[in-house]
Image: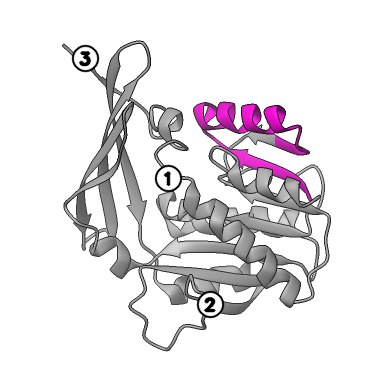
Amino acid sequence: MVTTLQKEPFTALADVYKISGLSAYSTQLASQLLDFLYNQSWEGSRMLDLATGIGEVPCWFATQRVRAVGVDSSAAMLKHARQQAESQGLAATFVQADIRTYQPDQPADLVLCLGGSLNYLPSLNDLGAVFRVAAAACVRGKPFIFDLHTIQGLSRTPAERILSEGEQHFIATRNAFSYETLSLSTRYTIFHYTSAWQRAEETHILRGYPVQAVQRLLSSSGFALEQTLTLDFAPITAVTNDDMLLFVARRV
């Protein structure tokens, strides 16, 4: 008999995050972003990754000789981030903190927040708080880049999904979108085999934000929005049906 354990978000998921391929999106996007930045004549030696998860993005940037710092509130995710950096001898460090109140020790030439992490913030006030943290960390004239699931994208999430399955893991979700709160409730069921099969469940809440509200918050937080792009780095049209968008802002 397998006992089901109710876990805080990203606690059980942390142990299967990499083997299930859930971190592949951010890793791939990081390499594309660096090419994009170099095409924009970016120069820098320090980066900050907010809501870093298992640290794939800072570790990748560290392989490119960029000093990287990752911040996340999840101890379970950061355990894997630190193990990865240590095993590869990378100049990436990780801090456990709330990204809404984090106080950076050193300025960064690039601030990132990827993987739809900002959709986990419950309100526009929280989103503005993270933007102000990013502004405090970011060198003037340098970029802050983040992605967001669009409201349309969240609303189109299938009611049930099998995210990943392998010999030692299985991840499925049940999803429900509320048009009243513009939020998606996702219940993860996670099976993971170590010495025996373990089952855990986590409930995640993602909030959708209008693009215009995001733009206003950026402006009031000390950023100028330069581009809003699709994940193919194409400029969005006035009306977009994309499930996720990439925002490129610059510290003024």
Residue ID for mark 2: 228
Q: Nearer the viewer, mark 3 or mark 1?
A: 1
Q: Magenta part of the protein: which range?
A: 66-93
Q: Quadrant of the N terminus?
A: top left
Q: Position of residue 210 (x, y in %)?
A: 39, 71
Q: Amino acid at mark 1?
A: Leu
Q: Is residue 126 visible?
A: no
Q: Tell me if 195 is positioned left or right of 48 in this view.
A: left
Q: Which one is nearer the viewer's eye here, 114 or 136?
A: 114
Q: Tell me if 192 is positioned left or right of 113 in this view.
A: left
Q: Nearer the viewer, mark 3 or mark 2?
A: 3
Q: Quadrant of the C terminus?
A: bottom right
In the image, residue 27 above or below residue 12: below
Inter-mark Cα distance, 3 to 1: 24 Å
Q: Is residue 9 visible?
A: yes
Q: Amino acid at mark 2?
A: Thr
Q: Nearer the viewer, mark 2 or mark 1?
A: 1
In the image, residue 81 above or below residue 236: above
Residue 92 is covered by the magenta coloring: yes
Q: Secondary structure at mark 3?
A: loop
Q: Position of residue 56 (x, y in %)?
A: 59, 43
Inter-mark Cα distance, 3 to 2: 45 Å
